[in-house]
Amino acid sequence: AARRLRQRFRSACKLRPSLGSRRSAMKLVVALALPAAALRPVKVTMSAAQNRRAFVIGGTAAAAAAATKANAYSLPDLPYAYDALEPSIDAATMKFHHGARPAYRDHHATYVAGINGKLDEKDQPPIADLMKIRAQAKDKGYNNAGGGVYNHDMFWQAMAPKGKGGAPSAALAAAIDKSFGSMDKMKEEWEALAAPASTFGSGWVWLYVKGKDLKMGNTPNQDNPLMKGANVEGIPILGIDVWEHAYYLKYQNRRPEYVKAFWDVVNWNQVSAWYDDALAGKAPQF
């Protein structure tokens, strides 16, 4: 048998010199040594039911993958440059707060990845609707990641470069006067609420609408007024992030300075539009 294979090998090398190598010739010998039946292609057949099942399974999987990809939450672009809010908020803080370095998954980008992971292969409703479902399955990850996405989406839109944010609309200005006495008194109350003594550790301070009334309150961590069961409930129209990462590079432990500087970059044009929507029962959508 060995002698016959050697003979076939020599014959293959002579008959097929274009194969280019002794290895190719050896492959030909192996093929020649196999029974003819083994070289025929094997035809695999499926029943009609199996065909239908494969089609349904494959189609469902493809549709689910497409839906998940299409509905995944994403990191929004900022409506201004990273240095546009100087000197109130420095460019370095904006870059790592928003997520300019994809490899590092900075703060907002981390929340986006977190909520996408929590809802992997599940329905991903508009982020404002997700906020209304507090502590799903008692999993704080929904609040922390989902709230982190919504709160920051709103935070960026609620700011504008100094001198470009306009002033409160007549309707919003009247509501501020009615609820707080004046704009100055509203700012004083806001700054007191944002101080470490009132909002200890990490959290947010909000202007929000409840019914037809304009109110102010704070929430811990990444909670917000849209969440059922939050310590303040309503429709937010303005929020300030008082987590240390929002101000520490520039202000260190001087949070009150950051809160005061925030007023210079509030986008009152946007906040006024959100106020009008809130009176109609509509929360800001992103």
Image (cartoon, rainbow, N blue to C red):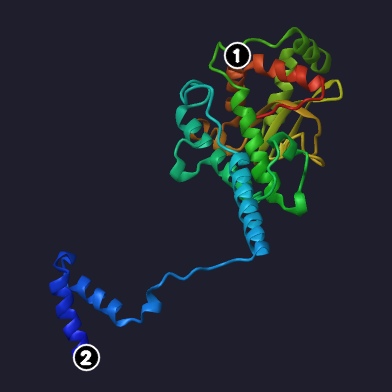
What percent of the width, then of the height, locates residue 133?
Answer: 77, 43
Percent across and percent down for residue 128 are 72, 34
According to the picture, the residue beneath numbered tag 2 turns out to be 2
Q: Nearer the viewer, residue 218 or 237?
A: 237
**At x 47% / y 33%, what residue is drawn?**
95
Q: Which residue is mark 1?
A: 165
Quadrant position of residue 46:
bottom right
Quarter of the image for the N terminus: give it.
Answer: bottom left
SS for tag 2?
A: helix
* Residue 131 at x, y percent in the picture: 74, 38
Residue 119 is at least partly visible in this image: yes
53 w.r.t. 154: above or below: below
Furthest residue toward top: 170
Q: Quadrant of the C terminus?
A: top right
Q: For the point 47% across and 23% down, which residue is it?
A: 81
Residue lying at 18% horizontally and 91% vertically, measured from the top left? 3
Amino acid on which disc 1 is placed: Gly
Tell me residue 267's x, y (percent).
Answer: 62, 17
Is the residue under label 2 in contact with that under label 1 (CB below 8 Å)?
A: no
- For the residues labelled 1 and 2, the Cα–Cα distance comes to 90 Å
- Using the image, tell me which numbered label, if any, was put on residue 270: none
Q: Nearer the viewer, residue 6 or 286?
A: 6
Amino acid at pointer 2: Ala
The earlier-in-sequence mark between 1 and 2 is 2
- Residue 19 position (above or below residue 163): below
Q: Residue at x 78, y 10 (%)?
A: 171
Callout count? 2
Query: Residue 119 or 95: which is nearer the viewer?
Result: 119
